[in-house]
Image (spheres, grey):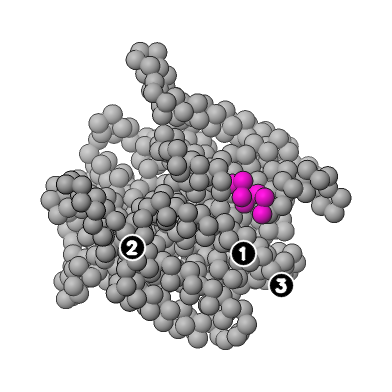
């Protein structure tokens, strides 16, 4: 199959899904354009801040679409392009987009509260506590990993085999551009808040700032060491995760969303111009080097089809910025389908290389393979290969930073909400509760633990990230299904995704536990594998407990 045909199929399926299935869900669940949204009802200038659709879409899209939809399909391509493409399209439409829309819908209908509060309200307090504890630990792991990855891409120095330290211009350019994005985001935040121009003028200003940052970054790379970047990045997210969303989070994600959209549009144009052939087999095997297609394919593709992390953004930050209920569909459902399109582009990119060709060109990581392929496509129209390669790499690297403060903010909210119930009188709390629910304390405790994990080695438990992420999806789907039932709305469209993701997640965790247990009794385990085993067991227990509580509520007879 040619790259153009794969692209056309994806555009038709994803575009049709938005127009038909998205609007079907919107009509089934009920949207009230005249209702006062939590962004206005609970407006506090920090987390609850009403914003235009394109601004909230920018936040949602930039937060959920980092390197995940690029890495996942490229890694999963070992099973062939056909199962990867089918899961991206089917999973993206009927699993991921439905989960993201349902999570945002449930949150907006419940004063912008997170999935944790939805679980408390419709399932029970124990389920909420377990879920929020898991979310908080998950966010600590993600912050630790992403901060280290970002610091690595910003690291201005590298040591060669001879022990000579040299400057890395590409990393320095990414660092400069990303830092300028932050400064420009603050300027844009004040511009959007106080000038009140129409969206076209705002868009023009954002694009000018974007181009300026890239141009300056390419010409003035900054060279800072890895350890220093760790400190700078954690200092940044400490401020960013408690700052008013209008001052940094909204405008920064707005800027980055344009960068991501330009990258996608450029890639689509490149595919139609170059018409790359597909050098992958349609299907290889159900078992590739000991990796079984079920559940590995579904855990690996993750963000390109369905990701539990999306539910945290949909219900944790984006829902608090929705101006009108009719905006939920493009922000949540639309952003997920756009991410699935990016995943399809990544699949076409890896398929365009003949066996061993990417490695021969020095393209070893998934983002490098993606950037190399898009550069090859666009070189057909005369664009310099090296420039396009650098720009795509810059774009992909910059997005890890966009997810960082969103994850840190969600982690902070999860920690605060763990100690609060929906009926807690916040005016008359005990001194202990006042401390632990303080946003500054919650942020510091979250980031200190993440920083420590960055330094001592998050890599020991990182292999469980995929399963943990999909477990979040299971719990979000359970919570939303119960919410829809309890509020007498049709929720059957969540049942199949919920049951399937349970099977995927619990099978993946079960296989991990079995593999590590066998190793424990035969040869013993090192520290890393021991930690993996402990966390895998804890994840499985937590997931089963919350799922059982949710399924019980789903099976209860509906009150008249």
| Quadrant in the picture for the N terminus | bottom left
Whether residues under marks 1 and 2 lie with C-beta atoms below 8 angstroms apart, the answer is: no
Foreground tag (3 vs 2): 2
Left or right of 366, for residue 230: right
Q: Which residues are magenta?
A: 440-446
Examine the structure image and report whether residue 245 is included in the region drawn in magenta: no
Q: Earlier in the sequence, mark 3 or mark 2?
A: 3
Q: Residue 105, located in which quarter of the rendered image?
A: bottom right
Residue 331 appears in the rendering: no
Q: Earlier in the sequence, mark 1 or mark 2?
A: 2
| Secondary structure category for the residue under label 1 | loop
| Secondary structure category for the residue under label 2 | loop
Query: Residue 203 placed where, x, y %?
Result: 47, 80
Query: Residue 149 placed where, x, y %?
Result: 39, 51
Q: Residue 518, located in which quarter of the rendered image?
A: top left
CA–CA distance between discs 3 and 2?
Answer: 52 Å
Asked if 490 appears above or below 12 in the picture, the reply is: above
Query: Residue 407 placed where, x, y %?
Result: 54, 53
| Residue receiving disc 2 | 223
| Secondary structure category for the residue under label 3 | loop
Label at residue 243: 1
Residue sitting at x 60%, y 70%: 246
Asked if 480 appears above or below 21 in the picture, the reply is: above
Residue sitting at x 43%, y 71%: 180
Residue sitting at x 54%, y 73%: 186
Query: Residue 405 placed where, x, y %?
Result: 53, 57
| Quadrant in the picture for the C terminus | top right
CA–CA distance between discs 1 and 2?
Answer: 28 Å
| Residue receiving disc 3 | 34
């Amino acid at each position: 199959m040619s790259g153009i045909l794969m692209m056309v199929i994806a555009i038709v399926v994803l575009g049709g899904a938005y127009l038909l299935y998205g609007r079907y869900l919107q009509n089934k669940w009920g949207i009230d354009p005249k209702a006062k949204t939590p962004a206005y009802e609970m407006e506090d200038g920090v987390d609850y801040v009403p914003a235009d659709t394109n601004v909230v879409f920018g936040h949602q899209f930039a937060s959920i679409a980092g390197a995940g939809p690029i890495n996942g399909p490229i890694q999963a391509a070992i099973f062939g392009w056909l199962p990867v493409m089918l899961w991206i399209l089917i999973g993206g439409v009927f699993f991921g987009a439905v989960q993201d829309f349902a999570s945002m819908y449930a949150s907006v209908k419940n004063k912008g509260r997170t999935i944790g509060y939805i679980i408390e309200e419709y399932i029970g307090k124990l389920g909420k506590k377990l879920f929020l504890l898991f979310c908080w630990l998950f966010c600590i792991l993600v912050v630790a990993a992403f901060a280290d990855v970002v610091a690595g891409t910003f690291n201005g120095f590298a040591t060669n085999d001879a022990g000579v330290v040299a400057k890395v211009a590409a990393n320095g350019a990414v660092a400069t551009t990303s830092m300028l994005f932050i400064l420009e985001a603050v300027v844009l935040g004040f511009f959007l808040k106080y000038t009140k121009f129409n969206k076209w003028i705002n868009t023009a200003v954002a694009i000018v700032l974007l181009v300026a940052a890239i141009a300056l970054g390419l010409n003035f790379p900054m060279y800072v060491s890895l350890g220093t970047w760790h400190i700078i990045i954690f200092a940044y997210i400490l401020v960013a995760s408690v700052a008013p969303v209008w001052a940094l989070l909204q405008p920064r994600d707005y800027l980055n969303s344009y960068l991501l959209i330009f990258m996608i549009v450029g890639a689509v144009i490149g595919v139609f111009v170059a018409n790359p052939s597909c050098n992958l087999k349609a299907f290889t095997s159900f078992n590739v080097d000991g990796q079984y297609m079920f559940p590995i394919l579904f855990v690996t593709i993750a963000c390109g089809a369905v990701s539990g992390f999306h539910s945290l953004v949909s219900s944790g930050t984006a829902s608090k910025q929705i101006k009108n209920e009719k905006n939920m569909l493009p922000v949540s459902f639309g952003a997920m389908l756009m991410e699935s399109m990016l995943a399809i582009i990544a699949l076409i990119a890896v398929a365009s290389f003949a066996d061993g060709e990417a490695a021969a060109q020095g393209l070893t990581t998934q983002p490098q393979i993606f950037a190399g392929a898009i550069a090859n496509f666009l070189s057909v129209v005369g664009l310099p290969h090296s420039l396009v390669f650098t720009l795509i790499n810059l774009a992909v690297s910059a997005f890890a930073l966009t997810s960082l403060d969103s994850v840190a903010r969600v982690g902070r909210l999860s920690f605060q909400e763990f100690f609060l119930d929906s009926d807690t009188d916040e005016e008359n709390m005990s001194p202990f509760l006042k401390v632990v629910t303080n946003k500054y304390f919650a942020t510091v405790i979250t980031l200190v633990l993440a920083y420590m994990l960055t330094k001592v080695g998050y890599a020991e438990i990182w292999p469980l990230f995929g399963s943990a992420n999909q477990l979040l999806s299971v719990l979000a789907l359970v919570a939303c299904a119960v919410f829809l039932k309890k509020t007498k709305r049709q929720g059957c469209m969540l049942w199949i995704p919920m049951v399937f993701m349970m099977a995927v997640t619990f099978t993946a965790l079960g296989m991990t536990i079995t593999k590590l247990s066998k190793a424990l009794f035969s040869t013993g385990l090192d520290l890393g594998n021991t930690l993996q085993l402990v966390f895998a067991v804890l994840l499985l227990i937590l997931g089963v407990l919350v799922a059982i509580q949710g399924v019980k509520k789903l099976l209860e007879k509906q009150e008249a």
